[in-house]
């Protein structure tokens, strides 16, 4: 039974504390579009996406009007394109990215994710060709997101792929240097990539998913921050309960929208992703949550412990509120998208190394971090390898989305606009790891991968 107090609290969350549905993402399988004829493949992909998702934006807008809940993004994820276009050349994959771009513009969605390859144990010719196509594909499109899974707990780390992705990120930065290297903001490197993630840039429609599905990401850092502030000087058990209670309420909103969107679109309901995703707006910051717990500034000693408490409590509260939870489900710490994180970097308390430590206890990894444009490809690969190792050893999803902003140095800023925000250039270690990265091969899976 929903009581008046619950309704009033939800209205306050929306109006004053930035509660929103961050994304309604429709997953679409493209396996039935596979064809030996590239022109037919392109036609079938465009037709299926624009047919299956033709009402996605309209339904989301109707739900916003009906329930008064903002739905910030309407998105699509598709089967990893390297499998769908396995016989294509790199030029063919670029052409396919442009077909996806045309579909996105036709439908009016914010992004299409799934220009992706899974190479944790090795790369097929199709995967290699897609990876080669990424810099150009992300340069000639605005709405396409790309991801590459280079490791898993079961397979270990494909260091050849890690090395290549350092080079690809550098090339993507160069090819979009006139826009502060924004192409890299649409590219993420994963370990243990989830099949049902509704958030970009890492969304894809996995192999075990139905033909179409609705996945929802709900976000409310401002709501959690306000609740912690109101709780005052309480002990940690009470603090955790406070977060659990508010996470339950946030997730119930997501469950409502997810099930109603699925019903109106005649599509199966998949999952609600519990992730707390910040925005550059004031009062919508994960860093503010941590500081409301008692930290003078995010990144100081105690930050990782505070984040661990937050992540655990969000999961516990959210799981009770939804019939199906999935995706990433944690707390995001993207620097450019979180005003508090930006302030912490500028204050000197939040470093790349501290962010890496924090990712051991939260979702999803080193995210939206701008680094000097002259950073070498090998150093970028080293950053990827360190972060991916955390995911493999801890059997969790981790990822890297770094932007080597060409022409920028430490102390400069880059600006992307919208939800991508802006970021100060963060320093990286200058000592070389090139000889380590050049070894190639695979780092073996950890012993606990043999659980069966």
Image: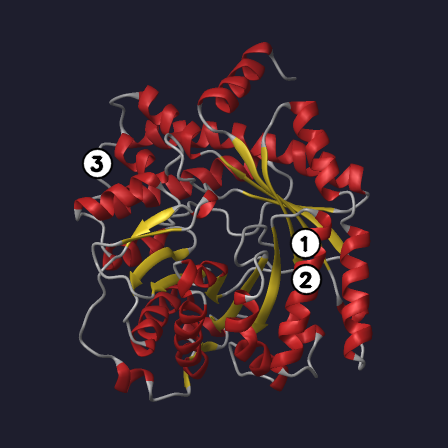
From this view, report whether residue 354 is shown above or below residue 253. Answer: below
Q: Can residue 172 be seen in the rendering of this structure?
A: yes
Q: Position of residue 22 (x, y in %)?
A: 55, 40
The residue at which mark 1 appears reads as 104
Q: Quadrant of the N terminus?
A: top right
Say which of marks 3 and 1 sits in front: 1
Colour treatment of the image: secondary structure
Mark toward the start of the polypeptide (3 vs 1): 1
Q: Tell me which residue sits at (75%, 65%) in the image.
A: 30
The residue at which mark 3 appears reads as 295
Q: Crowding at label 2, few (<14), some or many (≥20) Cα neighbours within 10 Å?
A: many
From this view, report whether residue 210 is shown above or below residue 318. Answer: below
Tell me the SS state at disc 1: helix
> How far apart are the two marked residues, 3 and 2, measured between alpha carbons?
44 Å
Q: Position of residue 231 (x, y in %)?
A: 33, 21
Mark 3–mark 2 CB contact (< 8 Å): no
Q: Can residue 299 be seen in the rendering of this structure?
A: no
Foreground: 406 or 58? 406
Q: Crowding at label 3, few (<14), some or many (≥20) Cα neighbours within 10 Å?
A: some
The residue at which mark 2 appears reads as 100
Q: Crowding at label 1, few (<14), some or many (≥20) Cα neighbours within 10 Å?
A: many
């Amino acid at each position: 039974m929903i009581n008046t107090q619950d309704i009033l609290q939800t209205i306050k969350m929306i109006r004053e504390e930035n509660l929103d549905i961050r994304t309604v993402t429709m997953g679409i399988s493209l396996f039935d579009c596979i064809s030996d004829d590239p022109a037919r493949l392109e036609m079938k992909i465009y037709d299926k996406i624009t047919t299956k998702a033709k009402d996605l934006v309209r339904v989301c807008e109707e739900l916003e009007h009906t329930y008064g809940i903002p739905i910030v993004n309407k998105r699509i994820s598709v089967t990893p394109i390297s499998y769908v276009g396995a016989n294509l050349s790199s030029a063919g994959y670029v052409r396919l990215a442009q077909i996806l771009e045309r579909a996105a513009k036709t439908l009016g969605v914010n992004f299409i994710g799934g220009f992706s390859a899974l190479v944790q144990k090795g790369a097929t010719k199709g995967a290699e060709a897609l990876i080669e196509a990424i810099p150009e594909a992300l340069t000639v499109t605005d709405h396409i997101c790309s991801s590459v899974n280079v490791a898993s707990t079961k397979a270990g780390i494909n260091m050849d792929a890690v090395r290549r992705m350092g080079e690809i990120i550098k090339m993507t930065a160069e090819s979009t240097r006139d826009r502060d290297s924004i192409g890299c903001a649409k590219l993420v490197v994963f370990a243990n990539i989830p099949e049902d993630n509704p958030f970009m840039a890492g969304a894809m429609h996995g192999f075990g998913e139905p033909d179409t599905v609705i996945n929802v990401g709900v976000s409310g850092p401002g709501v959690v921050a306000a609740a912690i502030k109101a709780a005052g000087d309480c002990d940690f058990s009470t603090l955790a309960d406070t977060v659990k209670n508010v996470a339950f309420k946030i997730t119930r909103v997501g469950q409502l929208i997810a099930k109603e969107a699925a019903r109106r679109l005649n599509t199966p309901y998949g999952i609600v992703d519990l992730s707390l995703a910040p925005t550059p707006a004031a009062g919508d910051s994960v860093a503010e949550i941590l500081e409301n717990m008692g930290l003078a500034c995010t990144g100081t000693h105690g930050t990782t412990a505070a984040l661990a408490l937050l992540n655990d409590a969000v999961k516990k509260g959210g799981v009770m509120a939804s019939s199906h939870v999935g995706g990433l489900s944690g707390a995001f710490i993207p620097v450019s998208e979180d005003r508090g994180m930006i302030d912490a970097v500028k204050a000197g308390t939040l470093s790349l190394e501290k962010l890496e430590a924090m990712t051991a206890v939260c979702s999803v990894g080193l995210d939206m971090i701008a680094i000097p444009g002259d950073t070498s490809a090998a150093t970028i690969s080293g950053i990827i390898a360190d972060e991916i190792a955390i995911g493999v050893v801890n059997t969790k999803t981790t990822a890297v989305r770094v932007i080597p902003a060409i022409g920028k140095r430490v102390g400069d800023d880059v600006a992307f606009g919208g939800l991508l925000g802006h970021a100060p250039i963060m320093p990286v270690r200058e000592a070389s790891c090139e000889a380590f990265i050049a070894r190639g091969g695979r780092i073996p899976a950890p012993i606990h991968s043999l659980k069966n």
